[in-house]
Amino acid sequence: MNALVSLRLKGAETFRTAILAPCGSIAELRAFIGETMALVTVHADLAETYATLGDDKGLEYALRCLAASSKAALETLADLKAANKRGPLMAGNDMEVVPVSAAEPLTSSDCDLRDFPFMPLDVRRLLTSATWIEAADDPKLGHALVCLWCESWQQVPAGSLPDNPRVLARLAMCTAEEWQRIADQALAGWQRCSDGRLYHPVVAEKVLEAWIEKLGQRKSSGAGNAKRWGVRFDAGALEKRIELATAMLTRLNPESRILRKRQQKASNPDRAPHGTPDRIPSGSQETETETETETETGTRTKQRKEEDAALSAGRRRPSQSGEPYAFEAGVIRLNAKDLEAWRKDYPNLSLEAELRSLSGRLHRRVLLVLTPKPTANG
């Protein structure tokens, strides 16, 4: 049922706007008044902006919206007073309050993903959904569905929505008439639970997967910081929350990828529950990835040294005197006989000048060291 609110502004024609009739609990009436007054603030800011810009049409529109919202809040306040006197039955509403469902909420009351800006989308599941297929003939329905899913992701508990027609219409970005037309289809699959909120099993499944990962990361980070700073960390409370979320997810989808992942890790006794070796707390400053990287770096450094040594050895060649010489650590070792032979072969080149040039290219000193002349005894 709709109530038409009419008001007459000085110098303006009567403005009529459709506002849903009051319904719901006393708490929901209070919530509606708060939300409506928030809209009043928005319209007041808009009116101030239009007045500053000299936009009279915009100013008139903002003032009409402000007046309509204010009157709706005042009328709801009267209903709230009547409800407080008469109990659970609403003033002017013969319909009894429907008792809440006995079903338990699908996510825990502390489930909070407001710091998760991204929501997973099961594409195949969506495209084969009957409700989504029906939305092909009604784009507004599809728009409302996506809006409700995204809004529920950011609610607390995550994956839920308030069971309030006015709030749902706004969350779905619908007018009162649009929401009345599509509400049944848009809320298909949502179920009211014992906490008085609406939950969707598919959204709740995705929420629980993200929540378990978030709690696991929080546990890992706490253990890592405790090890780094030498303080005590009690993960008991987090483990209980993880167990509760895991049990809820198991009821919704026993084949969830997160559950399979945890089962695989649990089946490996050499690894901790979150996939890291027991000797290193998961998520700490010394994570498995970093430790493996350090080990691999050390191995590569050792291999590089061995390769450099082999390359240096390969560059050595026997001198005419039988004594080897090599270029190692910026030092060229030659005996006097080899030096004379080099000068005879390259009379137009200065060995000293070549060494100075080489020093400049290598950015370090290159020394020429003459080894003693070999004796007859070798």
Image (tube, helix red, strand yellow):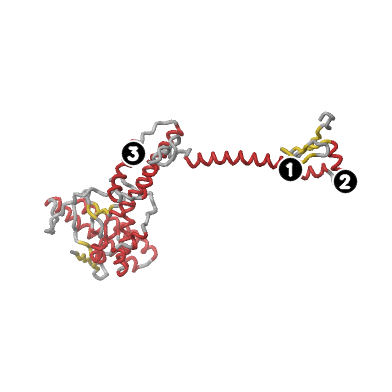
Q: Which mark is residue 89?
A: none
Q: State the residue position of label 3.
A: 239
Query: Badge 2: few (under 14), some or many (20 or more) residues near its Cα, within 10 Å?
Result: few
Of the two numbered discs 3 and 2 on the same chain, state the one appearing first in sequence. 3
Q: Indicate left or right for 286 with 36 as reference.
A: right
- Report the Cα–Cα distance between label 1 and label 3: 61 Å
The quarter of the picture where residue 14 lies is bottom left
The residue carrying mark 2 is: 347
Tell me the kind of residue under disc 1.
Arg
View extreme (top): residue: 377
Q: Earlier in the sequence, mark 2 or mark 1?
A: 1
Q: Where is the N terminus found, in terms of image quarters?
A: bottom left
Residue at image x 69%, y 42%?
A: 311
Which quadrant of the view contains residue 145?
bottom left
- Kind of element beneath mark 2: loop
Q: Can residue 224 be seen here? A: no
The residue indicated by pointer 1 is 315
Going from N to C along the chain, the mark reached first, 1 or 3, is 3
Q: Nearer the viewer, mark 1 or mark 3?
A: 1
Locate residue 167 relative to residue 54 in the image: left or right: left
